[in-house]
Amino acid sequence: EAGVAQSPRYKIIEKRQSVAFWCNPISGHATLYWYQQILGQGPKLLIQFQNNGVVDDSQLPKDRFSAERLKGVDSTLKIQPAKLEDSAVYLCASSLVKFTGELFFGEGSRLTVL
Amino acid sequence: DAKTTQPNSMESNEEEPVHLPCNHSTISGTDYIHWYRQLPSQGPEYVIHGLTSNVNNRMASLAIAEDRKSSTLILHRATLRDAAVYYCILRDQETSGSRLTFGEGTQLTVNP
């Protein structure tokens, strides 16, 4: 079974530039999550989708971050404009709607903002 | 979400059992206890979870105290591949749904 796919794995940009990350969840997983993990910290939930609707985006900095999941499958997370403090690993995860206790994470996209 | 407390780091030797503690004195009756681990340069992976009773799976065992204020993740025979950050997470099924709030976890070092 294919896992959660993310791209790009690495991205370096300068502050005030924009960046986008893509995620393809496990087939059949209707719930999709984006987490931000700053070096030395645990992952922090940014946004949760169920199908193409937002369930929780309370911790998403909406002035610069946006995310969409138009067809209820793939998702894109965008940052515009980026700040130095956005340097982190952006993790995508997916799960079944009927939660079994298990989130499946991708390998993450590492962003460096210079 | 109720808070958990874990040691910052622990060491073990290869092929020996490892007991990773987690304190959660403010746990509520509807909080599940989840354990995830994160290997270097990878996303977190599920290890085990439980509510009240001890749980076993192919990866580990979860021992939950009778008062549920603490729990222990047990790796029966550590390997070098078990070196990772281990996160103990409480999830209130009624208020959090499937949302998991990660702390900073315990960095486990396994010595050959």
Image (cartoon, rainbow, N blue to C red):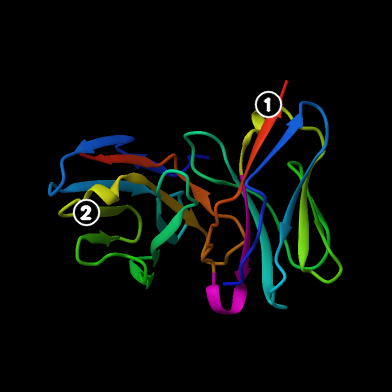
Residue A50 visible, this orientation = no
Furthest-left residue in view? A16
Residue, x 71% and y 57% (percent of image)? B22
Furthest-front residue in view? B8
Over which residues does the magenta segment extend?
A: B86-97
Left or right: residue B35 compared with residue A43: right
Mark 1 on the same chain as mark 2: no
- Please name the amino acid that badge 2 sits on: Ile
Q: Secondary structure at mark 2?
A: strand
Q: Quadrant of the C terminus of chain A?
A: top left
Residue, x 75% and y 52% (percent of image)? B21
For mark 1, what is the residue? B80
The circle on residue B92 is none
Residue, x 23% and y 54% (percent of image)? A78
Q: Nearer the viewer, residue A71 or A42?
A: A42
How dense is the environment of label 1, judged by Cα within 10 Å: few (below 14), some, or many (20 and up)? Answer: some
Mark 2 falls within which chain? A
- Please name the amino acid that badge 1 sits on: Leu
Is B94 in the magenta?
yes
What x and y, as percent, mark residue B99?
51, 66
Q: Secondary structure at mark 1?
A: helix
